């Protein structure tokens, strides 16, 4: 049991650790900016063209922070802005007056300004750190946005106009075999979409909840068919024969999504093969009895043929760069084909576009090998010599049993692969 004094001490310790986290984030920003400067200076001395200097650095920072390459780019841009243009925000972060995320919000809202105006915003927001007390994320962002608009309204308006070109849609896994579908839309369109869904929910009283009606209406209006009808979009499902036919409980896997319970997988397969409005095909693959690795395939072609590309995509599931969960866009030769790298399952790896391009930067080395148990391992060596490893995820099934894998491509409502 803790008495009041002990509880107060615990709260103080929690607060002290939060300040330490902020100080560590500030030091990471400073070190990242120093690394950027040192790398560019070295590459300039080595004769690297200006346009190629610093290529791959964001991914290297991401690996060091055990983060995705996309976030590595944010960390690098954040560091440059704080160290070279926003000293007051950096000082507030180092002092624990701002969290890393709130400092990021200030940097983000000032991104459209000139360097001179950005420094003015920096001083007005953070020179007096007492003014930051009690402000949450929304208040910090709103204050920064208001100052930015006051300093250069045209820049803010121009940024809003350019933002329309970034409209897009994403899908990502959610708990319990669900997905999040996120749309970035211009404000009038986004509000009108939501209003239309709410209006349908207000006028439909068939026993479904409001959220269910809105979700079903979204599916129906996007696909053009009732929500309960399987959509003819191919989804890959990797499942063992014993799970599919013998009642085993080994989970299945949807490439790009992750594992799903055996019962759910069997239900999806049954829907696909029994509904005359969808089409299903079965293809047998084989796993290593210990690791679950797929058997190898190879080709003499320069580009990976369709079958081998599909094989690698199923094996790797997502981008093989450590900490990068992006969908696979490229099938890459770990050792470049131009330098003798073979077009094989061992030398092949699935990557997102960004990681494949970063690998071409000077100083990066990638190699792959298959262990005795069949596990496919990829090693990445960065220009500083840091080594990072990733292994292909094992396929479903219990170790010690040489079972076939049934890859089921079927038409159903998940629409994961095409959506991703």
Image: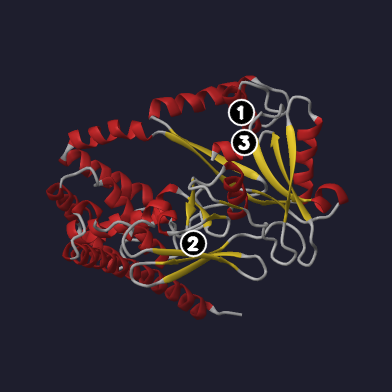
Q: Could you say where residue 127 lies in the image, as x and y percent from the top left?
A: 19, 59
Instruction: Determine the residue positioned at 51% across, 76% down.
Output: 7
Look at the picture and state if 259 lies above or below 207.
below
Q: Could you say where residue 32 lies in the image, as x and y percent from the top left?
A: 29, 65
Tell me the element at label 1: helix
Which numbered tag is attached to residue 103?
A: none
Quadrant in the picture for residue 148: top left
Give 404 or 37, whichever is nearer the viewer: 404
Badge 2 local density, few (<14 within 10 Å), some, or many (20+)? some
Give 305 or 204, whichever is nearer the viewer: 305
Q: CA distance from mark 2 to mark 1?
A: 34 Å
The residue most toward the front is 300
Give 76 or 241, whichever is nearer the viewer: 241
The answer to whether the residues at label 3 and label 1 have Cβ atoms under 8 Å apart is no
Please give left or right for residue 58 compared with residue 85 in the image.
right
The residue most toward the left is 116
Badge 1 local density, few (<14 within 10 Å), some, or many (20+)? some
Which numbered tag is attached to residue 415?
A: 3
Please give left or right for residue 141 compared with residue 316 in the image.
left
Q: Could you say where residue 331 lies in the image, as x and y percent from the top left?
A: 50, 49
Look at the picture and state if 253 lies above or below 149.
below
Instruction: Determine the residue positioned at 67% across, 32% down.
Output: 209
Please give left or right for residue 367 compared with residue 114 in the image.
right
**In this rendering, the label closer to the viewer, 3 or 1:** 3
Quadrant in the picture for residue 216: top right
Residue at image mark 2: 322
> Where does the C terminus fall, quadrant-wise?
top right
Residue at image mark 1: 219
């Amino acid at each position: 049991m803790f008495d009041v004094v002990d509880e107060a001490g615990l709260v103080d310790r929690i607060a002290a650790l939060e300040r330490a986290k902020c100080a560590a984030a500030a030091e990471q920003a400073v070190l990242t900016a120093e690394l950027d400067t040192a790398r560019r200076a070295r590459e300039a001395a080595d004769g690297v063209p200006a346009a190629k200097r610093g290529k791959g650095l964001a991914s290297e920072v991401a690996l060091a922070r055990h983060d995705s390459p996309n976030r590595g780019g944010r960390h690098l841009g954040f560091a440059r802005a704080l160290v070279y243009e926003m000293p007051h925000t950096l000082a507030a972060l180092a002092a624990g007056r701002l969290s890393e995320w709130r400092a990021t919000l200030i940097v983000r809202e000032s991104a459209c300004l000139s360097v001179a105006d950005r420094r003015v915003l920096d001083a007005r927001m953070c020179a007096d750190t007492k003014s930051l007390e009690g402000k949450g994320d929304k208040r910090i962002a709103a204050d920064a946005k208001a100052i930015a608009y006051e300093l250069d309204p045209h820049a803010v308006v121009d940024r809003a106009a350019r933002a329309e070109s970034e409209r897009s849609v994403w899908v990502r896994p959610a708990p319990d075999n669900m997905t999040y579908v996120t749309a970035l839309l211009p404000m009038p369109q986004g509000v009108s979409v939501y209003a239309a869904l709410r209006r349908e929910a207000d006028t439909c009283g068939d026993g479904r909840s409001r959220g269910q009606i809105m979700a079903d209406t979204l599916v129906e209006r996007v696909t053009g068919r009732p929500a309960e009808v399987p959509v003819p979009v191919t989804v890959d499902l990797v499942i063992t024969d014993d799970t599919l036919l013998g009642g085993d409980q080994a989970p299945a896997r949807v490439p790009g999504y992750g594992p799903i319970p055996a019962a759910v997988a069997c239900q999806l397969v049954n829907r696909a093969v029994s509904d005359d409005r969808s089409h299903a095909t079965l293809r047998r693959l084989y796993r290593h009895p210990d690791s679950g690795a797929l058997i190898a395939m190879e080709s003499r072609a320069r580009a990976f043929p369709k079958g081998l590309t599909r094989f690698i995509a199923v094996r790797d599931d997502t981008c093989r760069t450590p900490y990068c969960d992006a969908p696979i866009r490229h099938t890459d030769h770990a050792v470049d084909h131009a330098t003798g790298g073979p077009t094989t399952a061992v030398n092949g790896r699935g990557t997102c576009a960004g990681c494949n391009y970063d690998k071409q930067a000077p100083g990066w080395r990638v190699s792959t090998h298959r262990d005795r148990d069949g596990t496919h391992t990829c090693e990445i060596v960065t220009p500083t010599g840091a080594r990072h490893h990733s292994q292909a995820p094992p396929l479903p099934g219990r170790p010690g049993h040489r079972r076939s894998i049934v890859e089921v491509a079927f038409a159903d409502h998940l629409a994961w692969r095409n959506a991703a």
